[in-house]
Amino acid sequence: VTIEPRVLRQFAETVGPSHVLTDADVVAGYAADFTGRFVGATPAVVRPADTEQVASVVAVCRSAGLPIVPQGGNTGLVGGGVPLAGEVLLSLRRIDEISDVDEVSGQLTAGAGASLATVQQRAAAAGWRYGVDMASRDSATIGGTVATNAGGLRVLRHGDTRAQVLGIEAVLGTGSTVSHLGGLIKDNTGYHLPSLLCGSEGTLGIVTAVRLRLVAPAVDPVVALVGLGSVAEAVTTAGHLRRQVHGCEAIELFVAEGLELVCRVAELPLPTARMHPAYLLVEVSGGEGASTALAAALDAAPGVGETAVATDAARAAQLWRYREAHTEAINSLGPPHKLDVTLPASALAEFMGVVGAAVHAVAPGSRTWLFGHAADGNVHVNVTGVPPDRDDVDDVVFELVSGYGGSISAEHGIGTAKRAWLHLNRSAAELDAFRGIKKALDPDAILNPNVLLSV
Ligand code: S2G
Ligand code: ZN
């Protein structure tokens, strides 16, 4: 896609010439995704400073018929935030102010370009906590986590991003701006646009600010890394922990193969005396009482081998690293196919036992890596050793998941990577409803036209 000089001038008049980037080397960084699997190109990166400038850029693109890819931290994992069809790249990073921090009600307003880590820090400074956390916290932007309804490590305790969003400001594809950031907990006045726009992946509106609910900070968190005899016993134990240990903040799952890779790539010592087939990384909040309840639950749980417990922050961070380093360790093997899926709890262990062989049958040279959020039934199936554009591996995994009644996307969204399989999870009636909403809010189909819904 080329852009007429007249349009580039209009962009420059709107955001300032230094915030319209066209140099190929500079824009390349915006056009490739975090994993390296999705690499596109854009004729221009435009960096607005506020909602009004976003609205102006949308107006220029609507009149010029130019499609837009909105982008935050570019840590998305399903090719939803990169210009794969020559779209204009609209970066939200400059809109990063955090305001109206309310220490009484536990709320704050964040510009879309603020990093997740910055939001977490501002919440902590106000004596609260933001309930969503994930390894990409330093580069993911809050706007991107809203656009994708990011899940992360604490869905078990605090829910997904949608559960935190009280209000939203966004520029719709119609060119109009909706803004409702008052933060009233109960405001039952019509359609809930924050819920609709959260998870819409930039296809209905460009999120520019959100009003977020904050939660109580953890009290003396205790972290335990538990080695178990099998994935099945790990899944069963995760259920025991959820039922018996109040204050469970997170229950993460990984397996021996992934731990071996992490120790090798991140140069970490094995966390237990011997290697176990499966591991749970558990964080509970509540100090003495919680760690006693945790110990009792683990004593009664099946298959528990060794347990490494951390009661101080430094050791807790070391134990978390074994889980959080999975993404970078897998990325070091080359662009993975990341198939973030959800299984019904009753099928999770069986699925994890068969998916590797199913993938190997169509891609003998590949390796399959499994880890995820045990309590949410969410496993991150990462396949390495397969060319980025082959999708038979994706097909095998999604068909297998669908057969178990699972979801082809637990938390990363659909993006461009999973559009072809959306019908496995959504009926024709639902897809028609999606298209009706898309037509109403983005009538010219200029907002992420190649994402989520097939054009
Ligand atoms: C996680 C991050 C992305 C991935 O670590 O929970 O959501 O699949 C993932 O590597
Ligand atoms: Zn995850």
Image (tube, helix red, strand yellow):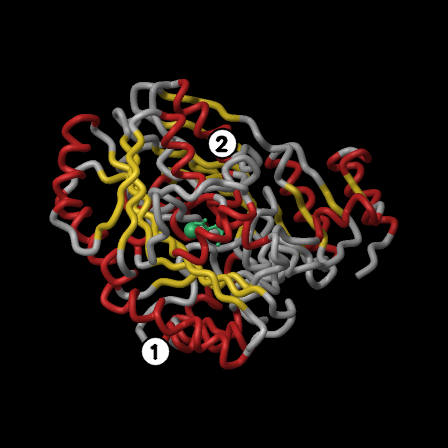
Q: Quadrant of residue 272?
A: top left
* Above/below status of 233 relative to 307: below
* Above/below status of 445 relative to 52: below
Q: Residue at x 88, y 49 (%)?
A: 5
Mark 1 residue crowding within 10 angstroms, few (<14) / some (14–19) / many (20+): few
Residue 19: % across, % down: 76, 36
Q: Is residue 187 visible?
A: no
| Residue with the mark numbered 2 | 117
Residue 396: % across, % down: 47, 77
Type of residue at label 2?
Ala
| Residue with the mark numbered 1 | 403
Q: Secondary structure at mark 2?
A: helix
Quarter of the image with the N terminus in it: bottom right
Q: Is residue 10 visible?
A: yes
Q: Secondary structure at mark 1?
A: helix
Q: Are marks 2 and 1 in contact (CB under 8 Å)?
A: no
Residue 278: % across, % down: 33, 56
Type of residue at label 1?
Gly
Q: Residue at x 55, y 59 (%)?
A: 78
Instruction: Name the side, left or right, on which 54 lies relative to 184.
Output: right
Mark 2 residue crowding within 10 angstroms, few (<14) / some (14–19) / many (20+): many
Quarter of the image with the C terminus in it: bottom right
